[in-house]
Image (spheres, rainbow, N blue to C red):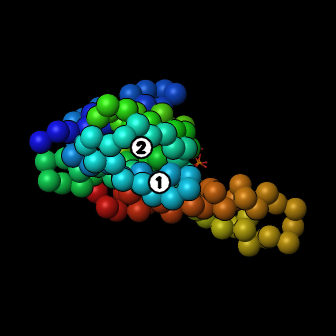
Amino acid sequence: MAQLLLEIVTPDKLVLSHSVDYVGAPGLLGEFGILPNHIPFLSALGIGSLMYKMSGKNHFVFVSGGFAEVSGNKVTVLAEVAEKPEDIDVERARKAQERAKARLDKAQENIDFARAQAALQRSILRMKVRDAA
Ligand code: ATP
């Protein structure tokens, strides 16, 4: 059966390159799923877990920002940030969550609400990806 070549790249490195059976990703406008022989497609990425299915098993990668492009059975993810579960520092994510919550608790003061909310979302979703592994 046809497969997809999934490549996840950040500005720093190639995070992974695998032949997979399915890719699901957090598009900016909602989740999307890609099977082999998909039509060409381009989407901006939001924050969340990218899922790929390989050898009958589901795998997860935390992604935040960037783009995903599908062309000729290749899915290229150019992510601002991408972390495999084993690369996620849980303690760092927990501290980031505490900081974001403390800022949001002071919402009446002059804080960047959207920035604190995005930081909170990143920390929660990092821990979710780590837990799913
Ligand atoms: P922090 O406040 O801890 O920096 P953040 O959500 O603001 O968290 P990002 O802007 O998403 O961080 O990422 C900046 C860089 O730090 C990226 O290279 C990202 O992979 C890395 N990074 C951030 N948090 C973690 C984590 N918990 N585990 C591993 N790498 C992380």
* Residue marked by disc 1: 26
Which residue is drawn at the image coordinates 25% and 42% (left, top)? 36
Of tags 2 and 1, the one toward the viewer is 1
Q: Are the residues at dot 2 and dot 1 in contact (C-beta closer than 8 Å)?
A: no
The three-letter amino acid code for the residue at tag 1 is: Pro
Q: Is residue 86 above or below residue 118?
A: above
- Is residue 82 shown left or right of residue 72? right
The answer to whether residue 95 is visible is no
Which residue is drawn at the image coordinates 48% and 34% (left, top)? 78
Which residue is drawn at the image coordinates 27% and 40% (left, top)? 37
Q: Is label 1's Cβ within 8 Å of ligand 1?
A: no
- Secondary structure at numbered mark 1: strand
Instruction: Determine crowd level at label 1: few under 14, some 14-19, many 20+ residues with C-alpha closer than 10 A.
Output: many
Count the numbered circles shown. Answer: 2
- Secondary structure at numbered mark 2: strand
Say which label, 2 or 1, has the lower sequence index: 1
Q: Taking the image as four quarters, which one is ligand 1 found in?
A: top right
Which one is in front, 55 or 10?
55
Q: Is label 2's Cβ within 8 Å of ligand 1?
A: yes
- Is residue 63 shown left or right of residue 24? right
Measured as percent of width and height from the top left, residue 67 is found at 51, 39
Measured as percent of width and height from the top left, residue 90 is found at 44, 55
* Residue marked by disc 2: 83
- Is residue 111 shown left or right of residue 126? right
Dividing the picture into quadrants, the one containing residue 116 is bottom right
